[in-house]
Image (cartoon, rainbow, N blue to C red):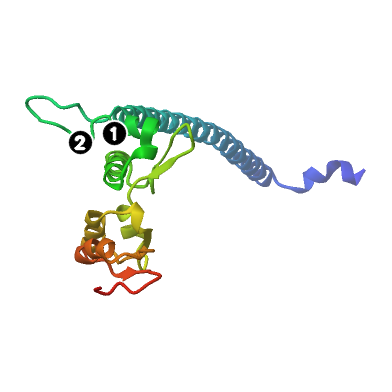
């Protein structure tokens, strides 16, 4: 019987204090739960809005980039304007189309023009592009020039088949602080034009001395 009337042991003041304390504690807990819920929902909504906005901005930039890429690719393939009375003849006009159809007959000077067009394509689009490769329908390949990439990679030297480089390109490499090695030159008259251009190393199967 005594257990049923345990609350009679406490004074009215104590009971009021306990009731107020319990109600206050319960209110704080409920306010914390409600605040946490609404804060979480608000933060979630803000995150979704920011994510959507960021995604839309990124997609917009990507659309612009690919549009620019497609336009510049088309322009590069189309090539410079043909000769006209004001600007005069342009040796690069139609050069890529000619290489795609009959590039196997190009000499080194003509190939260098095509490589220059591909290299400028990189400069006009994105410096993070390391190189451009153009492939024809009969599986021939031609590449953008190596100078910009070589400046970034800083190799000890560049090694070329001498049939795939011109003296002017050797001079450009040397002006950029890049050493050049050529292989395999076995005729003195062929070596002289590269020596005059400043080539650093020549691989040969003979002695390139004066006869």
* Label 2 neighbour load within 10 Å: few <14, some 14-19, many 20+: few
Q: Which residue lies under the disc numbered 2?
A: 91
Please say if 89 is above or below 20: above
Q: Kindly report the distance in space between the C-alpha atoms of the residues bearing marks 1 and 2.
A: 8 Å
Question: What residue is disc 1 on?
Answer: 95
Res 34 visible: yes
Residue 116 at x, y percent in the picture? 27, 44
The structure residue drawn at horizontal position 47% and vertical position 31%, both measured from the top left corner, is 137
Q: Position of residue 103 (x, y in %)?
A: 37, 37
Q: For the C terminus, which image quadrant? A: bottom left
Position in image of residue 164 (x %, y %): 35, 52
> Could you tell me how many numbered marks the image carries?
2
**In this picture, is 83 found above or below 4?**
above
The tag on residue 200 is none
Disc 2 element: loop
Q: Is residue 169 above or below residue 87?
A: below
At 31% across and 64% down in the image, what residue appears?
A: 187
Residue 21, given in percent of the width and then of the height, sits at 62, 44
Other-residue count near label 1 (Cα within 10 Å), few / some / many at <14 / 14–19 / ≥20: many
């Amino acid at each position: 019987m005594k257990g049923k009337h345990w609350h009679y042991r406490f004074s009215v003041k104590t009971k009021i204090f306990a009731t107020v304390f319990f109600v206050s504690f319960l209110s704080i807990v409920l306010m914390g739960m409600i605040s946490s819920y609404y804060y979480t929902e608000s933060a979630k909504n803000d995150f979704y809005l920011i994510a959507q906005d960021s995604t839309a901005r990124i997609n917009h930039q990507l659309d612009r980039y690919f549009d620019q890429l497609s336009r510049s690719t088309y322009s590069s393939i189309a090539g410079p304007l043909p000769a006209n009375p004001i600007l005069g003849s342009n040796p690069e006009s139609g050069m890529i189309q000619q290489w795609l159809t009959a590039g196997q007959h190009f000499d080194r000077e003509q190939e260098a023009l095509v490589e220059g067009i591909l290299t400028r394509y990189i400069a006009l689009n994105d410096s993070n592009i390391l190189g451009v490769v153009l492939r024809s329908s009969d599986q021939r390949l031609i590449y953008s020039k190596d100078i910009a990439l070589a400046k970034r990679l800083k190799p000890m030297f560049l090694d070329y088949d001498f049939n795939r480089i011109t003296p002017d390109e050797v001079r450009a490499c040397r002006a950029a602080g890049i050493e050049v090695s050529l292989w395999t030159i076995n005729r003195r008259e062929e070596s002289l034009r590269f020596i005059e251009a400043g080539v650093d190393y020549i691989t040969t199967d003979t002695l390139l001395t004066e006869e």
